[in-house]
Amino acid sequence: MGRVLALIVAIGVVLYVALTFLLGWMWEGYDPIRDTQSELGAVDSPYRTWMNIGGFMGLGVVILCFAAAYHLLLRDGIAKTIATALVMVAGVGMIVVGFFPCDAGCVDVTRTGELHGLWSMPGAIGLPLAAMLSASVFRTDGRFGTRWQAASFWIGLLSLVSGPIVALGWIEGVPGLLQRAGMWPSLFWMMAVSLRLVWLDEAHAAQGARV
């Protein structure tokens, strides 16, 4: 079951990124450098249903699958328990985001728009924190080398730092690019860890069969 869930995660991340590319390409005037992913699901977006259900909610389910695979396939420890909980919070938050599209242009003036921003925070915070904490989880597990540990920590930290930069508008003109640069590394980290867990589980099963 853990292996199947991990494969779902790897495929799901690719499908989410592909969907954002496709919807952005189909929407005339949409600029992925200037415009955020949330704008694809905004109330004035012609593709809001696709983005909110297939994009945000679908990604939330994928993140929850990752939480389950992470829990099932990594060795136990307090850091793993905390990281799993953080990933679960991120997944639930992303699902809820789909129920609350941002206002036109994602200039939030209604309660629904404000809730979109509020429920985006668990994913923007929980997943990067889980990546950072995974440095300790991987060290305890013993099957991930120092490169995996270092990469997890720094990817999580850089993703976490990008959130305030986007929210406070410290760099103008490229919020879409900044958001993707902050969010997608965590998603690709999640995909890479999932594929690694699949490989480790298959190697373990093959070794057991030989014994």
Image (cartoon, rainbow, N blue to C red):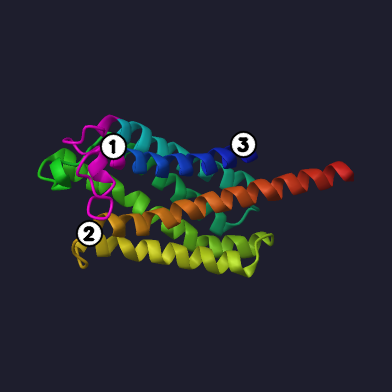
Q: Is residue 31 magenta?
A: yes
Q: Which label was assigned to residue 197? A: none
Residue that numbered label 1 is attached to: 26
Q: Nearer the viewer, mark 2 or mark 1?
A: 1
Magenta region, main secondary structure: loop
Find residue 167 and name its label: 2
Is 48 included in the stretch rendered in magenta? yes
Give the distance between the C-alpha atoms of the residues marked 2 and 1, in whole angstroms: 27 Å
N-term-proximal mark, 2 vs 1: 1
Name the quadrant containing residue 160.
bottom left
- Relative to 55, does residue 186 appear above or below in the rendering? below
- Does the residue at mark 1 contact the one at mark 3 (Cβ under 8 Å)? no
Q: Position of residue 133 (x, y in %)?
A: 50, 62
Identify the residue at image location x=37%, y=54%: 183
Which is nearer the N-term, disc 3 or disc 2?
A: 3
Along the line of sight, the residue nearer the viewer: 180 or 75: 180
Q: Secondary structure at mark 1?
A: helix
Q: Say which quadrant the C terminus sits in.
A: top right
On the picture, is 131 further left or further right than 180? right
Give the residues drawn in magenta, as a range: 24-49
Q: Percent x, y for residue 55?
A: 36, 37
- Categorize mark 2 by other alpha carbons within 10 Å: few (<14), some (14-19), many (20+): few
Q: Secondary structure at mark 2?
A: helix
Q: Is residue 71 above or below residue 163?
A: above
Residue drawn at point x = 22 percent, y = 45 percent: 30
Residue 16 percent coordinates (x, y): 41, 41
| Comparing labels 1 and 3, the label whose residue is closer to the camera | 1
Quadrant housing residue 148: bottom right
Indicate the amino acid at tag 2. Ala
Judging by the rendered image, the residue that carries numbered circle 3 is 4
